[in-house]
Amino acid sequence: MTARARQGPLDGLRVIDMSGIISGAFATTLMGDFGADVVMVEHPEVGDPIREWPVMTEEGVSLAWKSLGRNKRCVTLDLATERGRDIALDLVADADVVFENFRPGTMEQWGLGPEDIHAVNERAIMVRLSGYGQTGPKSQKPGFGTIAEGIAGWAHANGFPDREPLLPPIALADQTAAQFALQATLMAVFERDVGRGGSGEGQVIDVSLTEPLWRLFFGEVEAYDYDGHVRERTGNRHPSTAPRNIYETADGYMTLSASNQKVFERVAEAIGKPELIDDPRFADNETRVENVAALDAEIEAWTRRHTTEEAIEILEAHDAIVGPVYDMADIRADEQFRARDDFVTVDDPDVGEIETFGPIPKFSRTPGDVEFLGPAHGEHNYEVYGDELGFSNEELAELEVEGVI
């Protein structure tokens, strides 16, 4: 059985997604955007929890699910049953990649661990996502992204110095882990099929929610080991470069970053304060970071006298690097996003025509595609199990009665 034809650079890659919620699902969404044939497995009685997330349409359809479930064919299967296990192994038999994000040990209990997977398909790449990873003293603990954002040091470093640690307003740990999982998957595919002639063998990829997020703090491990430095909260300022902040304007807010000397000098000229260039407090980046409060006060005294549009126009005329603070309405109206086809319209049977994110990044020859949004629970059972695995309608009806699908 070959992967269903799709558009994009991953056309021909077959992915069986046994994960749920966000970490694995976001990785496979990205793969589906670029041509992978993603078959998502959900429990017959309880679908992916994202199906229940707001915002809901009047008919009770989750738009979060429509986005996260796009380009995936959805089947139902009770993996904890013997027949469910056998069907799962049928699905895996010719797959390139298998994603799962159950608590470590669960897949082994079901007879779907790495040894079982590789017994039917030695080329399969098994991607395992969990809170703490498959090994270590905390590996058996349940883990959500919120816990990872605390343990990974992100919450401690995020927010303002006079306030409590701050969690992100998005599933940052899950989506960061998803990006690492996707990178690792493509590395493993390269090693199997291309690198030094290709080994022809699959392997297991172990991704925790904590480590990818912690890895983003480059330089912090070294700084702590060198002199015990611990990064603290700095609000919208950056601990290593200045000026960099969100500045209040006459009618809102704007962003500004001047991470090198020439850009800083252009900012000083733009705000009518060329004397800041020769001020010893702001002589270089190191001194600017040490005196950032005084520098931000000089800049914000100027931005508050101008509207956001005026301030940006003046600063950009001096080749400074600035921008507005957008909400989704602003993003959708911005000509830059429109010019790059960052929104595409899809005709969905549940919600009608609706805009969704266009695939990114952009490919010159093999662009991605949004074929359809998140399907109904079990929508592709007969297509996948019947047309592709060869089950008869009678057999599928029997599996439904038994609760296997």
Image (tube, rainbow, N blue to C red):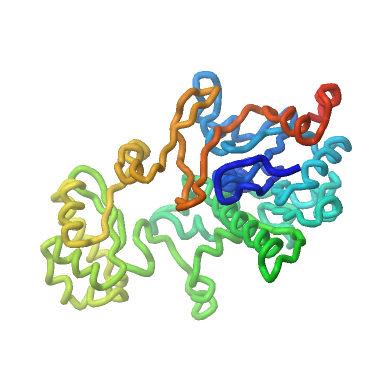
Residue in the image at 84% along x and 44% along y: 110
Residue ranking furthest to the right:
82
* 151 or 308: nearer the viewer: 308
Q: Is residue 377 visible?
A: yes
Residue ranking furthest to the bottom:
226
**Please, is residue 272 above or below residue 1 in the view?**
below
* 334 or 104: nearer the viewer: 334
Residue 167 placement, left or right of 277:
right
Task: List x then y, in percent, for residue 233.
Answer: 42, 60
- Quadrant for the N terminus in the image: top right
Task: List x then y, in percent, for residue 97.
Answer: 70, 51
* 14 or 163: nearer the viewer: 14
Q: Is residue 146 visible?
A: no
- Quadrant for the C terminus in the image: top right
Task: List x then y, in percent, for residue 327.
Answer: 35, 40
Residue in the image at 46% along x and 41% along y: 358
